[in-house]
Image (cartoon, rainbow, N blue to C red):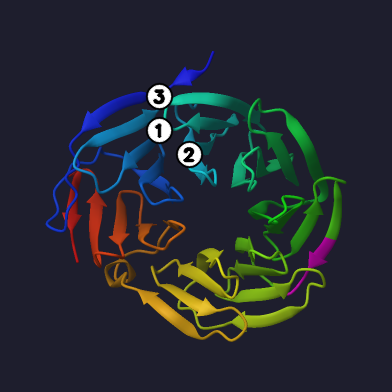
Amino acid sequence: MAEEATKSYISLEITRTGGGQFHYFPTSVVAISPDGSKIAFGGWNNEVLIYSLFTDSDAYVTYRGHIPSHRINALAWSYDGKYLASASRSEMSADIHILEVSTGQVSTRVPVNPEGVWSLSWSHDGTKLAYGSVDNTHLMVSLLQAQDGSILARYHAQEENVATALAWSPDDQYVAFGNLNGQIDIWDSQNNTIARSFTGHTHQIHALAFSPSGTLIASSCGNKLVHVWEATTGKILYTDRHNSANVIRLTWEKEGTSIRTGTADGFIKDWVALTGEITKEYPFSYARKQRMAHSLDWDNAGNRFAVGIDDRRVIILDAIQEAYWLCRAPTTHLEKIG
Protein backbone atom coordinates (compact mmCIF):
# COMPACT_ATOMS: atom_id res chain seq x y z
CA MET A 1 0.00 0.00 0.00
CA ALA A 2 1.35 3.41 -0.94
CA GLU A 3 2.41 5.67 1.86
CA GLU A 4 0.85 9.11 1.96
CA ALA A 5 2.46 12.39 2.83
CA THR A 6 0.84 14.87 5.19
CA LYS A 7 -0.62 17.90 3.44
CA SER A 8 -0.94 21.19 5.31
CA TYR A 9 -2.34 24.40 3.88
CA ILE A 10 -0.67 27.69 4.64
CA SER A 11 -0.65 31.24 3.31
CA LEU A 12 2.79 31.93 1.88
CA GLU A 13 2.22 35.48 0.59
CA ILE A 14 5.76 35.61 -0.77
CA THR A 15 6.18 39.02 -2.38
CA ARG A 16 8.95 41.59 -2.77
CA THR A 17 8.03 42.92 0.64
CA GLY A 18 8.60 39.58 2.34
CA GLY A 19 6.20 37.74 4.62
CA GLY A 20 5.24 34.10 4.81
CA GLN A 21 5.93 31.31 7.27
CA PHE A 22 8.26 28.36 6.95
CA HIS A 23 8.37 25.24 9.08
CA TYR A 24 11.38 24.78 11.39
CA PHE A 25 13.56 22.46 9.38
CA PRO A 26 17.32 21.82 9.62
CA THR A 27 18.11 21.16 5.96
CA SER A 28 20.71 18.91 4.40
CA VAL A 29 19.78 19.30 0.71
CA VAL A 30 17.52 21.50 -1.45
CA ALA A 31 16.06 20.94 -4.93
CA ILE A 32 13.90 23.18 -7.15
CA SER A 33 11.38 21.64 -9.55
CA PRO A 34 12.21 21.97 -13.27
CA ASP A 35 9.54 24.65 -13.82
CA GLY A 36 10.56 26.59 -10.70
CA SER A 37 7.15 26.33 -9.05
CA LYS A 38 8.21 24.23 -6.06
CA ILE A 39 11.16 23.75 -3.77
CA ALA A 40 11.95 20.58 -1.85
CA PHE A 41 13.92 20.47 1.39
CA GLY A 42 15.54 17.33 2.73
CA GLY A 43 16.36 17.34 6.42
CA TRP A 44 18.36 15.67 9.15
CA ASN A 45 15.15 14.45 10.80
CA ASN A 46 13.93 12.08 8.03
CA GLU A 47 11.44 14.63 6.61
CA VAL A 48 11.00 15.91 3.08
CA LEU A 49 9.10 19.18 2.66
CA ILE A 50 7.76 20.45 -0.66
CA TYR A 51 6.60 24.09 -0.87
CA SER A 52 4.86 25.93 -3.68
CA LEU A 53 6.79 29.13 -4.33
CA PHE A 54 5.54 32.66 -4.85
CA THR A 55 1.81 32.01 -4.58
CA ASP A 56 -0.75 33.70 -2.34
CA SER A 57 -1.91 30.43 -0.85
CA ASP A 58 -1.10 26.85 -1.61
CA ALA A 59 -0.26 23.50 -0.09
CA TYR A 60 2.98 22.28 1.25
CA VAL A 61 3.66 18.58 1.58
CA THR A 62 5.43 17.03 4.54
CA TYR A 63 6.61 13.51 3.93
CA ARG A 64 7.83 11.41 6.88
CA GLY A 65 7.87 7.96 5.29
CA HIS A 66 11.61 7.45 5.64
CA ILE A 67 12.84 5.56 8.67
CA PRO A 68 13.03 7.79 11.80
CA SER A 69 16.45 9.27 12.56
CA HIS A 70 17.44 9.01 8.90
CA ARG A 71 19.09 11.96 7.21
CA ILE A 72 17.84 12.90 3.72
CA ASN A 73 21.06 13.19 1.76
CA ALA A 74 19.85 13.31 -1.88
CA LEU A 75 16.84 14.66 -3.78
CA ALA A 76 16.03 14.52 -7.50
CA TRP A 77 13.03 15.81 -9.47
CA SER A 78 11.89 13.92 -12.56
CA TYR A 79 12.19 15.98 -15.74
CA ASP A 80 8.42 16.55 -15.92
CA GLY A 81 8.29 17.60 -12.26
CA LYS A 82 5.66 15.02 -11.36
CA TYR A 83 7.88 12.91 -9.11
CA LEU A 84 10.48 13.56 -6.45
CA ALA A 85 13.00 10.91 -5.47
CA SER A 86 14.59 11.09 -2.03
CA ALA A 87 17.36 9.01 -0.50
CA SER A 88 17.98 8.64 3.22
CA ARG A 89 20.54 6.92 5.38
CA SER A 90 21.57 6.18 8.94
CA GLU A 91 24.29 4.00 10.40
CA MET A 92 22.11 0.89 10.12
CA SER A 93 20.02 1.24 6.94
CA ALA A 94 19.18 3.38 3.91
CA ASP A 95 16.40 3.64 1.34
CA ILE A 96 15.06 5.49 -1.72
CA HIS A 97 11.47 6.71 -1.98
CA ILE A 98 9.69 8.11 -5.04
CA LEU A 99 6.91 10.55 -4.21
CA GLU A 100 4.11 11.47 -6.61
CA VAL A 101 3.94 15.16 -5.79
CA SER A 102 0.34 15.86 -6.85
CA THR A 103 -1.15 13.13 -4.68
CA GLY A 104 1.33 13.02 -1.82
CA GLN A 105 1.66 9.25 -2.24
CA VAL A 106 4.87 7.29 -2.40
CA SER A 107 4.70 4.97 -5.38
CA THR A 108 8.04 3.23 -4.89
CA ARG A 109 10.24 2.37 -1.95
CA VAL A 110 13.61 0.67 -2.41
CA PRO A 111 15.89 -0.46 0.44
CA VAL A 112 19.61 -0.01 -0.31
CA ASN A 113 22.89 -0.85 1.40
CA PRO A 114 23.42 0.74 4.83
CA GLU A 115 26.39 2.73 3.50
CA GLY A 116 23.77 4.90 1.82
CA VAL A 117 23.10 6.67 -1.47
CA TRP A 118 25.53 9.37 -2.54
CA SER A 119 23.91 10.47 -5.80
CA LEU A 120 20.57 10.28 -7.64
CA SER A 121 19.62 11.05 -11.24
CA TRP A 122 16.46 10.54 -13.32
CA SER A 123 16.52 9.34 -16.93
CA HIS A 124 15.15 11.86 -19.41
CA ASP A 125 12.11 9.70 -20.19
CA GLY A 126 11.23 9.50 -16.50
CA THR A 127 11.07 5.71 -16.35
CA LYS A 128 14.39 4.98 -14.61
CA LEU A 129 16.42 6.26 -11.70
CA ALA A 130 20.17 5.87 -11.34
CA TYR A 131 21.80 5.95 -7.94
CA GLY A 132 25.32 5.69 -6.66
CA SER A 133 25.89 3.72 -3.49
CA VAL A 134 28.48 1.63 -1.66
CA ASP A 135 28.55 -2.11 -1.15
CA ASN A 136 31.04 -3.15 1.53
CA THR A 137 33.19 -0.07 0.67
CA HIS A 138 33.05 -0.86 -3.08
CA LEU A 139 31.57 1.58 -5.60
CA MET A 140 28.21 0.56 -7.04
CA VAL A 141 25.87 2.23 -9.54
CA SER A 142 22.36 0.86 -10.02
CA LEU A 143 19.42 1.53 -12.30
CA LEU A 144 15.94 0.94 -10.97
CA GLN A 145 12.56 0.94 -12.66
CA ALA A 146 10.77 3.95 -11.23
CA GLN A 147 7.34 2.36 -11.41
CA ASP A 148 8.02 -0.67 -9.24
CA GLY A 149 11.58 -0.29 -7.90
CA SER A 150 12.96 -3.36 -9.66
CA ILE A 151 16.68 -3.29 -10.47
CA LEU A 152 17.31 -3.13 -14.23
CA ALA A 153 21.11 -3.06 -14.24
CA ARG A 154 23.96 -2.76 -11.79
CA TYR A 155 27.66 -1.94 -12.09
CA HIS A 156 29.73 -3.23 -9.19
CA ALA A 157 33.33 -1.99 -9.17
CA GLN A 158 36.21 -3.89 -7.66
CA GLU A 159 37.86 -0.86 -6.10
CA GLU A 160 36.94 0.86 -2.85
CA ASN A 161 35.29 4.11 -3.91
CA VAL A 162 32.01 6.03 -4.20
CA ALA A 163 30.00 7.38 -7.16
CA THR A 164 29.74 10.98 -6.01
CA ALA A 165 27.98 12.38 -9.10
CA LEU A 166 25.78 10.96 -11.89
CA ALA A 167 24.54 12.15 -15.30
CA TRP A 168 22.47 10.51 -18.06
CA SER A 169 23.24 10.89 -21.75
CA PRO A 170 20.38 12.50 -23.74
CA ASP A 171 19.41 9.13 -25.27
CA ASP A 172 19.34 7.47 -21.81
CA GLN A 173 21.79 4.77 -22.84
CA TYR A 174 24.84 5.95 -20.93
CA VAL A 175 25.32 7.00 -17.32
CA ALA A 176 28.43 9.00 -16.47
CA PHE A 177 29.62 8.77 -12.88
CA GLY A 178 32.51 10.38 -11.05
CA ASN A 179 34.29 9.13 -7.96
CA LEU A 180 36.31 10.32 -4.98
CA ASN A 181 39.60 10.10 -6.90
CA GLY A 182 38.48 12.31 -9.78
CA GLN A 183 37.94 9.59 -12.39
CA ILE A 184 34.85 9.68 -14.62
CA ASP A 185 33.46 6.48 -16.14
CA ILE A 186 30.88 6.25 -18.91
CA TRP A 187 28.68 3.23 -18.21
CA ASP A 188 26.76 1.64 -21.06
CA SER A 189 23.75 0.63 -18.98
CA GLN A 190 22.18 -1.45 -21.77
CA ASN A 191 25.25 -3.69 -22.13
CA ASN A 192 26.52 -3.26 -18.54
CA THR A 193 30.02 -2.29 -19.64
CA ILE A 194 32.28 0.71 -19.09
CA ALA A 195 32.48 2.34 -22.52
CA ARG A 196 35.11 4.95 -21.62
CA SER A 197 37.02 6.32 -18.64
CA PHE A 198 38.23 9.91 -18.32
CA THR A 199 41.22 10.96 -16.24
CA GLY A 200 42.18 14.58 -15.74
CA HIS A 201 40.69 15.55 -12.42
CA THR A 202 42.68 14.88 -9.26
CA HIS A 203 39.99 15.44 -6.62
CA GLN A 204 36.44 14.27 -5.86
CA ILE A 205 33.91 14.83 -8.64
CA HIS A 206 31.13 17.14 -7.45
CA ALA A 207 28.94 17.54 -10.55
CA LEU A 208 28.49 16.09 -14.05
CA ALA A 209 26.32 16.90 -17.06
CA PHE A 210 26.05 15.84 -20.71
CA SER A 211 25.42 18.57 -23.25
CA PRO A 212 21.99 18.40 -24.98
CA SER A 213 23.61 16.86 -28.07
CA GLY A 214 25.50 14.29 -25.99
CA THR A 215 28.81 15.24 -27.63
CA LEU A 216 30.26 17.09 -24.61
CA ILE A 217 30.46 16.44 -20.87
CA ALA A 218 31.10 19.06 -18.20
CA SER A 219 32.48 18.07 -14.80
CA SER A 220 33.65 19.77 -11.63
CA CYS A 221 35.93 18.54 -8.87
CA GLY A 222 37.32 19.44 -5.46
CA ASN A 223 40.06 21.82 -6.64
CA LYS A 224 37.70 24.45 -8.14
CA LEU A 225 38.23 23.31 -11.75
CA VAL A 226 35.59 22.57 -14.39
CA HIS A 227 36.57 20.45 -17.40
CA VAL A 228 34.68 20.30 -20.69
CA TRP A 229 35.30 16.93 -22.34
CA GLU A 230 34.68 15.49 -25.76
CA ALA A 231 32.33 12.64 -24.87
CA THR A 232 33.55 10.13 -27.44
CA THR A 233 37.29 10.51 -26.81
CA GLY A 234 37.72 11.90 -23.29
CA LYS A 235 39.78 14.79 -24.64
CA ILE A 236 39.66 17.94 -22.48
CA LEU A 237 38.55 20.80 -24.73
CA TYR A 238 38.48 23.57 -22.12
CA THR A 239 39.20 24.04 -18.41
CA ASP A 240 37.54 26.77 -16.36
CA ARG A 241 39.97 27.83 -13.64
CA HIS A 242 38.19 31.02 -12.60
CA ASN A 243 36.20 29.85 -9.59
CA SER A 244 36.48 31.17 -6.05
CA ALA A 245 35.32 27.85 -4.53
CA ASN A 246 34.38 24.33 -5.60
CA VAL A 247 31.63 24.09 -8.21
CA ILE A 248 28.88 22.00 -6.60
CA ARG A 249 26.20 22.32 -9.31
CA LEU A 250 26.36 22.63 -13.08
CA THR A 251 23.97 22.32 -16.03
CA TRP A 252 24.04 23.00 -19.77
CA GLU A 253 21.90 25.64 -21.38
CA LYS A 254 19.38 24.40 -23.96
CA GLU A 255 21.38 25.55 -26.97
CA GLY A 256 24.28 23.37 -25.85
CA THR A 257 27.06 25.94 -26.04
CA SER A 258 26.88 27.48 -22.56
CA ILE A 259 27.13 26.12 -19.02
CA ARG A 260 25.69 27.39 -15.74
CA THR A 261 27.83 26.71 -12.66
CA GLY A 262 27.32 27.40 -8.97
CA THR A 263 30.07 27.39 -6.36
CA ALA A 264 30.09 26.56 -2.66
CA ASP A 265 30.45 30.26 -1.84
CA GLY A 266 27.25 31.13 -3.74
CA PHE A 267 28.68 32.47 -7.01
CA ILE A 268 26.54 31.50 -10.01
CA LYS A 269 27.43 32.30 -13.60
CA ASP A 270 26.62 31.39 -17.20
CA TRP A 271 29.61 30.97 -19.50
CA VAL A 272 30.54 29.77 -22.98
CA ALA A 273 31.71 26.17 -22.73
CA LEU A 274 34.71 26.29 -25.07
CA THR A 275 36.00 29.79 -24.29
CA GLY A 276 35.04 30.51 -20.67
CA GLU A 277 33.49 33.87 -21.59
CA ILE A 278 31.03 34.85 -18.83
CA THR A 279 27.66 35.84 -20.28
CA LYS A 280 25.68 36.36 -17.07
CA GLU A 281 26.18 36.48 -13.31
CA TYR A 282 23.53 36.09 -10.62
CA PRO A 283 23.25 38.32 -7.53
CA PHE A 284 23.97 36.04 -4.61
CA SER A 285 26.22 38.52 -2.80
CA TYR A 286 24.51 37.78 0.53
CA ALA A 287 25.26 34.08 0.26
CA ARG A 288 28.91 34.79 -0.50
CA LYS A 289 29.25 36.59 2.84
CA GLN A 290 27.97 33.60 4.77
CA ARG A 291 29.18 30.06 5.36
CA MET A 292 29.87 27.79 2.42
CA ALA A 293 26.81 26.31 0.68
CA HIS A 294 26.04 22.65 1.28
CA SER A 295 23.50 22.48 -1.55
CA LEU A 296 22.54 24.59 -4.56
CA ASP A 297 19.89 24.25 -7.26
CA TRP A 298 17.95 26.17 -9.94
CA ASP A 299 15.07 25.65 -12.34
CA ASN A 300 15.40 24.96 -16.06
CA ALA A 301 14.76 28.55 -17.11
CA GLY A 302 17.22 30.03 -14.64
CA ASN A 303 14.53 32.15 -12.98
CA ARG A 304 14.64 30.72 -9.44
CA PHE A 305 17.59 29.58 -7.38
CA ALA A 306 18.10 28.11 -3.93
CA VAL A 307 21.27 27.98 -1.85
CA GLY A 308 21.48 26.04 1.41
CA ILE A 309 24.18 27.94 3.29
CA ASP A 310 24.17 25.88 6.49
CA ASP A 311 21.86 23.45 8.24
CA ARG A 312 19.28 26.12 9.14
CA ARG A 313 19.27 28.69 6.34
CA VAL A 314 18.25 28.59 2.67
CA ILE A 315 18.38 31.59 0.35
CA ILE A 316 15.79 31.71 -2.45
CA LEU A 317 16.40 34.04 -5.41
CA ASP A 318 13.80 35.18 -7.92
CA ALA A 319 15.98 36.37 -10.80
CA ILE A 320 13.02 37.93 -12.64
CA GLN A 321 12.17 40.20 -9.71
CA GLU A 322 15.87 40.54 -8.84
CA ALA A 323 15.02 39.98 -5.19
CA TYR A 324 15.86 37.23 -2.74
CA TRP A 325 14.72 35.89 0.60
CA LEU A 326 16.25 34.09 3.54
CA CYS A 327 14.56 31.11 5.15
CA ARG A 328 16.06 31.03 8.64
CA ALA A 329 15.21 28.46 11.32
CA PRO A 330 14.09 28.43 14.08
CA THR A 331 12.38 31.81 13.54
CA THR A 332 10.45 30.23 10.57
CA HIS A 333 10.07 33.62 8.84
CA LEU A 334 10.89 34.16 5.19
CA GLU A 335 12.90 37.38 5.34
CA LYS A 336 13.52 39.61 2.32
CA ILE A 337 17.22 40.44 2.24
CA GLY A 338 17.79 41.99 -1.16
Q: Nearer the viewer, residue 224 or 335?
A: 335
Considering the numbered disc 2 on the image, is that residue within a helix, a strand or a loop? Answer: strand
Q: Nearer the viewer, residue 157 or 260?
A: 260
* Circle number at residue 47: 1
Considering the numbered disc 1 on the image, is that residue within a helix, a strand or a loop? Answer: loop
On the rendered structure, is 332 left or right of 110?
left
Which amino acid type is marked by label 2?
Ile
User: Pointer 3: what residue?
Assistant: 5
Measure how far apart labels 3 and 2 are at the Cα level. 15 Å
Q: Check the image and name the residue furthest to the top.
A: 1
Q: Position of residue 206 (x, y in %)?
A: 58, 62
Residue 275, quarter of the rendered image: bottom right
Q: Residues within 10 Å of mark 2 (few under 14, many from 20)?
A: many
Identify the residue at image location x=55%, y=24%: 107
Which amino acid type is marked by label 1?
Glu
Marks 1,2: beta carbons within 8 A: yes
Main SS type for the magenta part? strand
Q: Position of residue 303 (x, y in %)?
A: 36, 61
Span shown in magenta: 196-200
The image quadrant where one finds the N terminus is top right
Identify the residue at image location x=52%, y=17%: 2
Which amino acid type is marked by label 3?
Ala
